[in-house]
Image (spheres, rainbow, N blue to C red):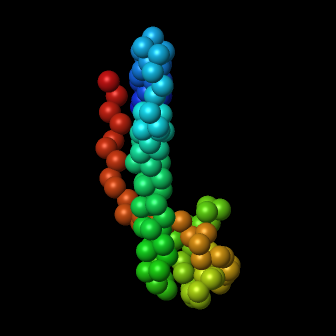
Amino acid sequence: MLLRAIFVFLTIAIQSTAFAQTAAGAKPSIMESLLPFAVMFGVIYFLMIRPQSKQRKQHAKFLSELKRGELVVTAGGIIGKIDSLTDKFITLEVEDGTKMKVIRSYVLSPVNTEVKAQPANTPN
């Protein structure tokens, strides 16, 4: 929604500038022509590229700090306890005695084992 509003604003600004310039008969300078593209790149960078980069760094840090015995969830939705670790693979124990080898980068996050108390539903 925000991107759309910014895009509409930039389109109107470009059109009004272009109309004013054609009325005066002057050609826009190269800076005036490149300014909208620079602004759009800046908006895309701060709204899309930068947050993804931060998230990727956090995930890489999480993967490097994995330890044996942690409960994790994989990209496929498999929950298991880490049995052994290598550079590329992790062996998960998903049941008693059932082990599964997965690629390390497919581990998404730790499993939150804390269960918060839910308030009881009261009839109205």
Asked whether, in this view, residue 41 is left or right of residue 92, the answer is left
Q: Nearer the viewer, residue 102 or 43?
A: 43
Asked whether, in this view, residue 77 is left or right of residue 3, the answer is right
Asked whether, in this view, residue 32 is left or right of residue 119, the answer is right
Is residue 3 something that shows in the picture? no
Task: Please state the horizontal and vertical placement of residue 20, each as a whole percent of the image.
Answer: 42, 15
Q: Nearer the viewer, residue 108 or 60?
A: 60
Res. 39 image quadrant: top left
* Residue at the image point whose x is 31% and y is 44% from the top: 119
* Residue at the image point whose x is 44% and y is 33% from the top: 29
Identify the image quadrant of the C terminus: top left
Q: Is residue 110 above or below residue 116?
A: below
Identify the image quadrant of the N terminus: top left
* Residue at the image point whose x is 45% and y is 21% from the top: 26
Is residue 24 something that shows in the picture? yes
Task: Please state the horizontal and vertical placement of residue 28, each as a whole percent of the image.
Answer: 46, 28
Task: Please state the horizontal and vertical placement of residue 49, each as a whole percent of the image.
Answer: 48, 53
Q: Is residue 112 above or below residue 18?
A: below
* Residue at the image point whose x is 62% and y is 83% from the top: 88
Res. 81 image quadrant: bottom right
Q: Nearer the viewer, residue 8 or 53?
A: 8
Q: Is residue 115 above or below residue 17?
A: below
